[in-house]
Amino acid sequence: MSYSQKNFLNQPFYSPAKFENDQKDLMISQLKAENFELKQNDRDYQELATHLKSLEHRYNMLHEEKMRNEVEFRNRSDQTLKTIANLRNEIDNLKSQLTDKHIENQEMKAENLAFKEITEHRSQENQRVKK
């Protein structure tokens, strides 16, 4: 037997069937890894989808609350403006009444002063008549 024949016998021999099985094992291993990764991605997606739904729900709740608060604020503002307008009208009416009362008071003072002068004048006349 020659050296090349011995060397050929000592080298490991890979048959096409063995090579094909190794390729299939490698592909199965890759597919299992890909399957695991896809399942993990699916779990991550489900978590994100759940979190997104939670955030959307919270957003909707806060949006509704904001709308209610805005309506309430507008109603309170409108009511406050109406109250202010009513109070201003009342102040104007009271100022007018005060002015009228002041004029009436001045007229009564003048009238009282005139009565006092008349009374004093009559009293002086009565004093002169008695003398």
Image (cartoon, rainbow, N blue to C red):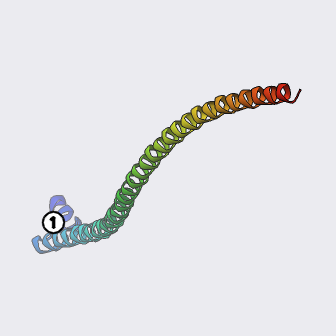
- Report if residue 14 is visible in the image: no
Occupied quadrant, residue 18: bottom left
The image position of residue 14, as x and y in percent, is 17, 69
- Seen as rendered, the residue at the extreme right is 131
Please state the horizontal and vertical placement of residue 29, each as a whole percent of the image. Answer: 25, 70
Q: Is residue 127 visible?
A: yes
108 vs 6: above or below = above
Q: Nearer the viewer, residue 52 or 40?
A: 52
Instruction: Specify whether 84 is left or right of 102.
Output: left
Image-quadrant location for residue 41: bottom left
- When the figure is inspected, residue 72 is found, relative to residue 123, above or below; the finding is below
105 on left or right of 66: right
Identify the image quadrant of residue 56.
Answer: bottom left
In the rendered image, residue 73, in percent from the top left (x then y), is placed at 42, 53
Q: Residues within 10 Å of mark 1 (few under 14, many from 20)?
A: few
Image vertical order of residue 49 relative to residue 88, above or below: below
Q: Which residue is label 1 attached to?
A: 1
| The one of 103 and 81 positioned closer to us in this rendering | 103
Left or right of 75: which side holds 49?
left
Q: Helix, strand or loop at disc 1?
A: loop
**Foreground pick, 14 / 93:** 93
Quadrant into which the C terminus falls: top right
Who's the residue at 29% across and 70% down the image? Answer: 36
Could you tell me residue 121's position as x and y percent?
76, 26
Q: Decide which of 108, 91 is in the foreground and name it.
A: 108
Count of marks, rendered view: 1
Q: Amino acid at mark 1?
A: Met
In the picture as drawn, the residue positioned furthest to the left comes out as 16
- In the rendered image, the vertical position of residue 113 relative to residue 64, given as above or below: above
